[in-house]
Amino acid sequence: MKKGILITIIGIIIIGISYFGIEMYGFAKGVKEDAKKENLNAELNAQTQFSGYPTSDKVEFNIKAGKEYYAGEPIEIKLIWKNESDKNEKIMIRDYWGHPIGTGASIMDLKNVELTSQISSHILSSQLFSPDDLKEYEIELKPNETKEYSVDLLKIPILKQTESNLKSTLPKGKYKIQVFYYSKMSKEIEIEIK
């Protein structure tokens, strides 16, 4: 009889531990997913905060960069819009805090470790823009017309601050970058800092 009670108690303990482990795993997974969603929402806030401007599906967005740069110097890249439509299309370029409203950037090392804590420094702004505020910054692209705009990549995102990177800059090395313009995403390109 004592043996049966002991086996039952051990069984209950095992079931309890298993249940607790499953719950903790689910909780941890939920926390991780919530953190991902929160970070994504925060990143997208930089774009939705400046979302007073419509973008056309007919306008292709991309970037061009040099192959190498030097540590401590600006990383000059070109933002490129091309009208793929057979009619005029509009884009908007309004500089705010050193880069156009609605742009964001992701910078990763070659091991795919994300180095940006926010894709746009605009997340720090409390200013909201309406379509009327941005009307004067409209640029009309004719069919097949291209518009290029130079910007310092390091002015766009907020970089993560780490023990080895206290100044939140990009040290020497190779990086993969991608730039966003509202809902459009550029191709990923690789740069090197010497």
Image (cartoon, grey):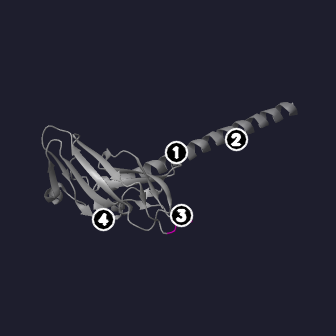
Which one is closest to the eye, mark 2 or mark 1?
Answer: 1
Residue 190: percent from left, percent from top = 43, 50
Quarter where residue 25 is shown: top right
Q: CA distance from mark 3 to mark 2?
A: 37 Å
Residue 117 counted in the magenta span:
no
Please give the name of the residue rendered at 32% of the width and 64% of the height, measured from the top-left corner. 125
Residue 139: percent from left, percent from top = 16, 53
Q: Which residue is mark 2?
A: 17
Which one is closest to the eye, mark 3 or mark 2?
Answer: 3
Residue 80: percent from left, percent from top = 27, 50
Q: Which mark is residue 98?
A: 4
- From what the image shows, is residue 7 above or below residue 35? above
Q: CA distance from mark 2 to mark 4?
A: 54 Å
N-terminal of the pair, mark 4 or mark 1, is 1
Quadrant including the N terminus: top right
Identify the element where label 3 is drawn. loop
Packing grade of label 4 (10 A; few <14, some 14-19, many >=20) is some
Q: Which residue is mark 3?
A: 162
Asked if the residues shown at circle 4 and circle 3 are in contact, with their CB atoms under 8 angstroms apart, the answer is no
N-terminal of the pair, mark 1 or mark 3, is 1
Which one is closest to the eye, mark 4 or mark 1?
Answer: 4
Please give the name of the residue rendered at 51% of the width and 50% of the height, measured from the top-left corner. 110
Q: CA distance from mark 1 to mark 3?
A: 26 Å
The amino acid sitting under disc 2 is Ile
